[in-house]
Amino acid sequence: MLESLIDRIKARLIEYVRERYGYSLPQVVAEQPPRVELGDLAFPFCFELAKKLKRAPRQIAAEIVEDLPDLPGVAKMEVAGPGYLNCFLKRDDFFRKLLQPPTHRPSGPDSGKVIVEHTNINPNKSAHIGHLRNAVLGDTFARLLRSVGERVEVQNYIDDTGVQVADVVVGFKYLEKRTLKEIKALPGRFDYYCWDLYARVSSFYESAPENRELRGRTLREIEEGEGDTADIARYVSRTIVRCHLATMSRIGVAYDLLPKESDILHLNFWSHAFQLLKQAGAIHYETEGRHEGCWVMRAGDSGPRDQAGSSSSSGGSGHEEDKIIVRSNGTVTYVGKDIAYQLWKLGLLGMDFFYRPFHTYSDGHRVMMTDSFDNQDSSNPDFGRGERVYNVIDSRQSYLQNIVVAGLRALGFHHQADRSTHFSYEMVGLSPACCQDLGIRLSEEDRRRPYLEVSGRKGLGVKADDLIDRLLEKSAAEVQARHPQLAAGETQAIARSIAVGALRYFLLKYTRNSIIAFDFREALSFEGETGPYLQYTVVRINSIFRKVEALDSRFSHQSLPEFMDQPEAAAFLRQSISNDFWSLLYLAAQLETQVRVAIQTCEPAGVAKYLFNLAQALNHFYHRHRIKDEPDPLRKGFYLALITILRGRLQEGMDLLGISVPDRM
RNA sequence: GCGCCCGUAGCUCAGCUGGAUAGAGCACCUGCCUUCUAAGCAGGGGGUCGCAGGUUCGAAUCCUGCCGGGCGUACCA
């Protein structure tokens, strides 16, 4: 609503400047003045005009203010500072528009589907905090896209034939000498068991070099897909995937499709992509040198595009190293498989998977898994063929992501390459203090580092479910202390909401390029800039409404807009929206802008920060004005309408971050 | 070596398509619960925005160089 208003004002300004000065402004930027008294929008274009006209910017601005006809929604214009044109909006009109129930946006643009790929955890051990960051970023981004009407498909790629799964299989088969039946009978949490086993396999390899050869053999047996080893691998990866879905489901993260690497292999997606790459001359066979016998791609000559957000001048310094796509033994690398997958996602491969249902969430949503065989009951859903693709993968994989995009370009798919975005983010490390909490001994050198890298291979990390459990425990204790009379079930439900809110906000408040040095004290905090702060703000407002509505039905949600439309209320509005109140309203109106920017820059942190500011403003208001006992009904109605608007935006925004509002706190 | 990222308050971070007095949270100090939930609010101290140049009316923000740190640069994923 604010956005379209600004657009209309801009258009009128451009038109006016063209008519009056014969100059076409290429664009008009609208800034926000530093203080409310200075206005709501600041237009700096007079500085630009000053250069063209060779006159002082202030003078031009004054001239325009004098002569400009009325603009829609604008109360007045003023000259400000060295030559800004500042704009004051009609506050009462604006207020009434914000109070209207949100008009449902038309069911999305026809621009095709957006695919968001995230989580992608190797299915060989439990998820850890690094995976949580990935999943929360991806899930939140998907929510943001859906909120602006995009059709979104969320995929979680399962690398069920990789070395990491092979390592755990080696652990079961050769280190522990277990049969599949014994593995199935293992008690306790399977993902936790594998977490430890995986770490033990690393030392198993180190203890004797011949052990390492077991990995290659196992890997081959898994790829072939038959026999005892493949059965174990299948059991491990399927079971772990179920664990991951359960973990992520605890924090409100769900998927639409689980594409498996084994299916890409078995359905020969790669051989098809290989043909395409060869035909296009995108890769070539090396007959000599150190890459003899390999198929390689020249990276660099098509100038791989940079990832989202950060712009680079793409060096372009001569030729870069070649990247091996097919090894001399004929097997394909990860990049090759990823090119095939990426082609499929963009609808460029001309092949498709088979599908079968994998899991149904408690809300009825069903997640599908790819399959290599046709299967009676699966009416093939419409997966893939994305118009845009976002790959949520940490920044360490930038190089590989660039190669994949370079592959698309080498095939001539420039349009699709432009719409294929690496949503990159920095890793989550462990602060030295956190390592101490975990009982990990550190060297003198490590203690001085700001963080240590999480390593699944070494078993060094904080497991996702352990962290969630601790959050639950702490929030349940807090709720218990404040509301001892609550039934256990209710306490748990509230604790869950708070734990999830705290975790998701914690992972979202950092910008993507910031490395999170994980620290329990910070992650478990419920005060200050945290999810629970947002929740608490809404809970207290809700509490006001509960009491006010019980006393006087004029002020129930539905009747507030009508109440404020009465002539007396309208007159009250015209006079009473002082700067204090207005800055709150104006802040609330900026949610849509924040969402748009977050999508454009792949940076949900901005929305998180914004909501914190909004909550702060609301808390400030809460303390300054007593609402329930306000004697003047007009003023009371105004206050209630105001907090309705603020709470509405706050809640809407929290929804986008996957943070719910508990009944009480 | 080359590529990418980071360096802002004691700590953790925002701000970076140049713009008006550089902001939060935590920690520390001082106040506020017979009044709509104190997971809150008000106030206080704390800054050569890594360093040096350049562009500009104007630089934390753009350019160049340097210093310090991280990641990547595999016939691993």
Image (tube, coloured by chain):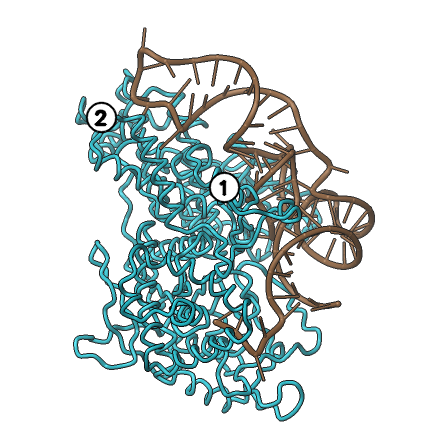
Chain colours: A cyan, B brown
Q: Residue at x 54, y 71 (%)?
A: A208
Q: Looking at this view, is A432 or A52 the one in front? A: A432
Q: Earlier in the sequence, mark 1 or mark 2?
A: 1
Report the disc number at residue A437: 1
What amino acid does circle 2 point to?
A: Gln
What residue is drawn where x is 31% and y is 32%?
A539
- Badge 1 crowding class, 10 Å Cα cut-off, few under 14, some 14 to 19, many 20 or more, is few
For mark 2, give the secondary structure: loop
Q: Is A386 drawn above or below residue A582 in the view shown?
A: below
Locate residue A589: give its quadrant. Answer: top left
Q: Position of residue A484 (x, y in %)?
A: 26, 26
Q: Quick check: A594 left or right of A380?
A: right
Q: Position of residue B31 (x, y in %)?
A: 48, 12
Q: Is residue A664 left or right of residue A525?
A: left
Tell whether label 2 touches label 1 (CB within 8 Å). no
Is A442 above or below relative to A547?
Answer: below
Q: Which mark is residue A485?
A: 2
The amino acid pointed to by label 1 is Asp
- Asked which quadrant contains residue A24, the reply is bottom right
Give the chain letter at badge 1. A
- Kindly tell me whether residue A640 is visible in this rendering: yes
Q: Label 1 vs label 2: CA separation? A: 33 Å
